[in-house]
Each structure stands twice: as C-alpha cells, then as structure tokens.
Image (cartoon, helix red, strand yellow):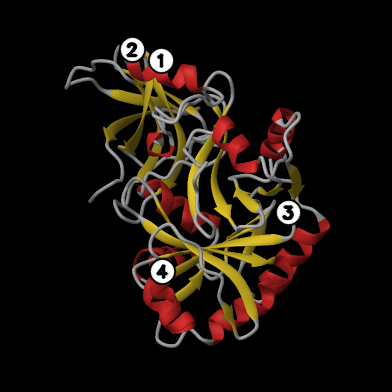
C-alpha cells in the first residue's frame, strides 16, 4: 500500500485547492471535476493523470546496465543515452516484483515502477553484491504525469512546438518550457493505446498544473482522478499494481511478454518463464468480464462455471461508459471451455452471471 508522506501530502493538498469540486480519499484524488467529464477527456481530449505513488529509483555506476540486463526480463544492456525501454522484475518463481520503464540519462539511470512501496528498491539492493552501483530512492523528488487522449499530441505540439517531432517512439526529450524542466517520452500498451509521460520535479508541480490550464487554448484538457482512469484502463485492458501485477501472476498470464526477451539469456525468474512457454504450462489468461447486471462487488471475487467449478477471478471492476454495464478484468484458467459454458460470481446477496470477452473491450 502507498503510504503518504508529508511532502506528498502537501502536494496533494495544494493540488486539490486548485479544484474546489475535487474529491480526495485515502491517498488518492478520486476526481477533480467530475468522473464522466474526465473520462471523456481521456478518450477524446487530453486527460492528465498525476501520480504521486510511482517508484523512482536512481542508479549510477559502471556496472548498472550489465546488472539490470542480468536481473530483469528485457534486453537493456545496449540501451542508448536518452532512450527508454520497458522491463519487468520477477522473483524466482517468475511472479512480479514490478513492471518498470528504464530511462538512460547518460550519467545516470532511472527506473520508474508501478508502486512506491519500497519493494522494488529493496529487491534491487538485495542483489547488488560486488558491483559498482549506487542507488537512490527519488520517489518523493518527482511526480509522474501521464497524458492520454486523441488530442494529446496536438496539445503537446502547442506547448513544445517543433520539439515534439523529435520523439521517435523510444527516445526521451528534455524540454525547457517557460522555465519548466522535465523529461518527456511516449509509452504503448498491448491494446495499441499510446500515451505520453512527463517526469517532473515535485516542487514544480503546482506551477506547472497552472501553466497547462492557462495555456490549454481550444483543447479539452482535464486532470483525471482515480475513478475515471479506472474505468478507462479496464476498458483498455491495462493491468495495474496491485490488482493484476502482483506476486500471484506472471507475464504470460497478464499479456506482458512483449516486455520479456527470449533471446538475451538468463534473468531472475527466467527458467520458470521459459518452461511455461516451452511446455505450454501457462495456467491463466487475462480476460474481460461483462456482468449481466450492475454489481457492486468486493475484489478479488472468484468466477465459477455453471458446474460450480472455480475457473478464475475478477481483479478489477468498474461501471463502463462504453458499454453502460459493469465490467471487469481478471483471469480465467487456460483450458478448453465448451462454448455453452456459463460463468457467474456470487455476492453476499445473489448470483450474477458473466460474459467473457477479449481485451480491450469493444462496443
């Protein structure tokens, strides 16, 4: 669980003061203006997600790339300066430690993970023995801003001018925009969804938020809370920590094999991942679930067949604007299921039938 510190708490306090209609609970901003409005921006405008709970680890030293190449899933040894690449960290059983993006800034490297709970940081330190590597936890020094939506590239062109054209898919640019210094790069999900990520010094956040809103011009720019983003990312089949990225599942099961190299040689968990692939031993697939009636369920919840066989589980759920139904993502056993098999979940009060579908959801 993300534990809010006084620096993060101060930033959140300042941020929600900019949005009088916002709703804040626990360690997250649920919405800034309204869930439906923010959801529409994620799809058709510019929806900006501000994340305070990403793990950001700095690594320096001559052995850094060789070490990361040896312990993580992807081939990172030859990553060029000012480029990025996704890579996964797994335990010895092939289950997740974290899903990360590795950034090469020439004189140092940054790993951006899913959750700032010190798990990745401590795991990396455990495996550094004699290598020339220095580590630092910079999770409180930066905030991550993700820009989704069909207008995102055009909006960034307005802000950055021609510099946005220098992004070639895998590189990082470091613009200086009216005194704001940040790093910018693009990311892609398996569904084909493309979005942009800004890595910003934490002390610049509030002023930068004001700058973006003051310079949005004709664009539909909205800051987006956790509720709208949860709907959007479930519809798009994006796995998230801790629901689908955790130590119960492996990259085969949540469709992240594109972030695994099968040619680079060993990494921690490699034997398990290779064996699952070679011998077709993958037990689960990530899948979409459509509830046949609106539901409010406690997660995770077990999925059963009409023969009362436990076949999977729902790990994330939302009320979809796309389908106007309750939907979820989760996992189902990879086995032959007859076409007329019926699926259901049991809540405290009743049984709710499910329809299974591929990801992302389509209307």
Indicate the secondary structure of the residue bearing disc 4.
helix
Per the rendering, the mark at residue 275 is 1
* In contact (CB < 8 Å): disc 2 and disc 1: yes
Give me the C-alpha separation between circle 1 and circle 4: 43 Å
Q: Nearer the viewer, residue 88 or 208?
A: 88
List the residue tagged with mark 3: 138
| Disc with the residue nearer the chain's start (3 vs 2) | 3
Query: Would residue 43 appear left or right of 146 to someone viewing this image?
Result: left
| Disc with the residue nearer the chain's start (4 vs 2) | 4
Q: Where does residue 19 sit, x and y in percent of width and height?
A: 62, 74
Give me the C-alpha separation between circle 2 and circle 1: 6 Å
Q: Residues within 10 Å of mark 4 (few under 14, many from 20)?
A: many
List the residue tagged with mark 2: 279
Query: Would residue 270 appear left or right of 312 to someone viewing this image?
Result: right
Per the rendering, the mark at residue 41 is 4
The residue at the point 52 percent across, 36 percent down is 88
| Disc with the residue nearer the chain's start (4 vs 3) | 4
243 to 46, vertically: above or below = above
Q: Nearer the viewer, residue 274 or 360?
A: 274
* In contact (CB < 8 Å): disc 1 and disc 4: no
Per the rendering, the mark at residue 148 is none
Query: Would residue 125 appear left or right of 70 to someone viewing this image?
Result: right
The residue at the point 55 percent across, 48 percent down is 102
Q: Where does residue 191 sit, x and y in percent of width and height?
A: 32, 47
Indicate the secondary structure of the residue bearing disc 1.
helix
- The image shows a total of numbered marks equal to 4
Give me the C-alpha separation between circle 4 and circle 3: 30 Å
């Amino acid at each position: 669980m993300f534990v809010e510190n006084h620096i993060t708490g101060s930033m959140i306090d300042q941020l929600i003061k900019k949005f009088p209609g916002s709703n804040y609970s626990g360690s997250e901003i649920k919405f800034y203006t309204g869930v439906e409005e923010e959801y529409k921006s994620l799809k058709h405008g510019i929806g900006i997600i501000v994340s305070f709970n990403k793990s950001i680890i700095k690594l320096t030293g001559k052995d850094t790339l060789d070490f990361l190449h040896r312990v993580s899933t992807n081939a990172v040894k030859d990553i060029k300066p000012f480029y990025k690449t996704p890579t996964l960290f797994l335990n010895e059983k092939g289950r997740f430690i974290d899903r990360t993006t590795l950034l090469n800034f020439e004189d140092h490297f940054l790993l951006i993970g899913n959750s700032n709970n010190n798990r990745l940081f401590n795991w990396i330190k455990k495996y550094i023995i004699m290598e020339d590597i220095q580590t630092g936890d910079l999770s409180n020094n930066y905030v991550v801003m993700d820009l989704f939506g069909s207008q995102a590239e055009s909006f960034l062109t307005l802000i950055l001018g021609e510099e946005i054209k220098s992004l070639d898919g895998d590189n990082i640019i470091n613009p200086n925009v009216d005194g704001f210094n940040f790093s910018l790069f693009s990311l892609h999900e398996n569904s084909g969804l493309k979005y942009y990520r800004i890595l910003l010094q934490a002390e610049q956040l509030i002023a930068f938020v004001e700058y973006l809103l003051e310079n949005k011009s004709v664009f539909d720019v909205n800051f987006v809370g956790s509720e709208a983003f949860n709907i959007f990312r479930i519809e798009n089949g994006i796995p998230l920590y801790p629901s689908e990225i955790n130590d119960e599942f492996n990259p085969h099961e949540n469709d992240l094999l594109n972030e695994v190299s099968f040619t680079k040689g060993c990494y921690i968990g490699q034997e398990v991942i290779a064996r699952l692939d070679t011998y077709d031993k993958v037990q689960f697939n990530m899948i979409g679930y459509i509830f046949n009636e609106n539901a409010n369920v406690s997660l995770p919840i077990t999925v059963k067949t009409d023969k009362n066989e436990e076949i999977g589980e729902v790990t994330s759920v939302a009320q979809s604007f796309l389908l106007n139904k309750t939907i979820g993502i989760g996992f189902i056993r990879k086995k032959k299921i007859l076409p007329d098999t019926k699926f259901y979940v049991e809540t405290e009060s009743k049984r709710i039938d499910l329809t299974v579908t591929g990801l992302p959801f389509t209307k």
